[in-house]
Amino acid sequence: MKLFFLTLAFGLITISSLFAQQEFIIDTSKSELLWKGFYLFQFSGHEGFVKIKSGQITKTNNKLSGGSFVIDMNTIANTDGGYSEGLVSHLKNEDFFDVKKHPDAKLKITKVEYESATSARVFADLTIKGITEDIEFQANMDPKNKFDVTARFKIDRTRWGITFNYLKDGAISDAMEFEVGLVLK
């Protein structure tokens, strides 16, 4: 009889731990990563998207607790107008992302601190051009939104060795903005 209760207790603990932590695959066909770059002394810039190649999000007790995703830098696109082909080629070369040598960028969540039931401060390692730097940003989990997780943040591109600056017509800001919308399977 003792053996039965020990087996039952172990089974319940195992089942509860399975439900406590779950891993979700990122649906790359429905998720999006938008980027924006700015001129320093002008009210303009460029924007576009880059595709997420793969990734997963971990939830513990139904709350975001970790995860990572890979960004396919070969898919970078410009969506703001006539500069598209030339600008994309420039973004892919050594001046910016050096996509031939570094076809992937990566983000790995290292820590999550909840501020409310749907909002958290996320700490992560971001790898671009083979350089890993820590970042932090606000993430939101809104069940009414089309995305399961959203985040918007800026980085200083020079921390990742992206130092190109064109001074003839206008300096490029070191700040780059990202908007991420993840759909989980």
Image (cartoon, grey):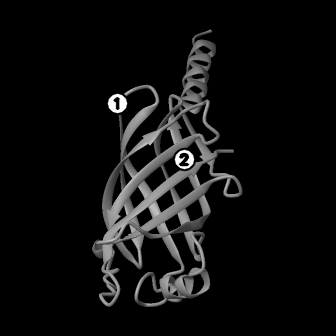
> x%, y% of residue 163?
31, 82
Residue 123 appears in view: yes
Q: Residues within 10 Å of mark 2 (few under 14, many from 20)?
A: many
Q: Residues within 10 Å of mark 1 (few under 14, many from 20)?
A: few
Q: In this rendering, is residue 95 above or below 55?
A: below
Quadrant including the N terminus: top right
Cα separation, mark 2 vs mark 1, equals 19 Å
User: Which kind of residue does numbered mark 2 sit on?
Assistant: Ile
> x%, y% of residue 3?
60, 16
The residue that appears at 59% across and 12% down in the rendered structure is: 5
> x%, y% of residue 138?
38, 43
Q: In this rendering, is residue 79 above or below 181?
A: below
Quadrant including the C terminus: top right
Return the mark for residue 115.
1
The residue that appears at 53% across and 30% down in the rendered structure is: 62
Q: Could you tell which of marks 2 and 1 lies nearer the N-terminus?
A: 2
- In the image, 59: left or right of 108? right
Residue on which disc 2 sits: 57
The residue that appears at 32% across and 90% down in the rendered structure is: 168
> x%, y% of residue 31?
63, 53
From the viewer's side, name the closer residue of 49 and 159: 49
Residue 76 appears in view: no
